[in-house]
Amino acid sequence: MVRRTKAEAEQTREQILDAAEAVFLERGVARASLEEIAQVAGVTRGAVYWHFRNKADLFDAMYCRVHLPMQDLFDQVMTLADGGAVEALKAFCAQSLQCLATNSRRQRVYTILFHRCEFVDGLRESNNRLVAIRDSWLGSMEDLFRREQSLGRLTDVCPRLAAITIHTAMIGIYFDYLRSPHTYDLPAEAPRLIDLVFRCVD
């Protein structure tokens, strides 16, 4: 048996993830099978299991492929403590929406997440991980608003409610845009949308 190089193995993994996006988008996560994904990827089912334990593991990896770069940017914003953190968070939110509108992979993955997925059976743990990510982001934003208050700004704002307001507004825009993209011109309108959201917390 010929040993595969690390680069070849990574290429196969990416093929499988690309195929998973396509199959999940077309059939929904619950109805999709690893056999179908293997066929679309042009690999054996054994190759899928070599890289991923099960469908939930594959789903998580697919999500992380679009989430982790934004997580890195979010973490950078959350470390700011020079009084510019709120403006940086606004810019991050606008960038996130613009990226959604212009990045086809991000569109596919979040369409799957919001409109093609039921978190039952084997995906319950995936849902728990998504909830943990949400809780972490809410906690980080709440801490940011508390730091702003310590600097004498946003004194009339409840940090917890401010974080919840921003999060739920972003989720709502994501959900509705992916269901009806023609309703929005996100590349142009994202900054103004975010300005309106942040008026609720400044």
Image (spheres, helix red, strand yellow):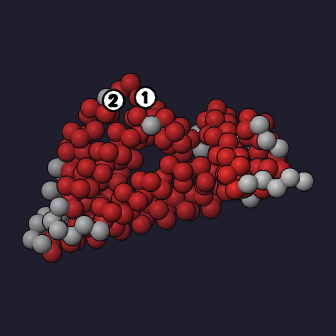
Residue 202 visible somewhere in the drawing: yes
The answer to which quarter of the image holds residue 20 is: top right
Query: Is residue 111 in view?
Result: no
Residue at image point 33% right, 63% down: 76
Compute the Cα span from label 1 to label 2.
8 Å
- Residue at the disc numbered 1: 180
The residue at 31%/33% (across/down) is 187
Mark linked to residue 184: 2
Q: Which mark is residue 69?
A: none
Q: Residue drawn 48% across and 41% down?
A: 106
Q: Is residue 126 left or right of residue 135?
A: right
The vertical placement of 139 against 184, above or below, is below
In the picture, measured across the screen, residue 92 lies left or right of residue 122, that is left
- Which residue is painted at 28% across and 38% down in the image? 190
Locate the C terminus by quadrant. Answer: bottom left
- Foreground: 27 or 88? 88
Q: Position of residue 87 (x, y in %)?
A: 19, 55
Q: For the residue marked with disc 2, what is the amino acid? A: Tyr
State the SS at label 2: loop
Q: Which amino acid does the dot numbered 1 rest on?
A: Ser
Q: Are marks 1 and 2 in contact (CB under 8 Å)?
A: yes
Q: Name the residue at the top extreme.
A: 182
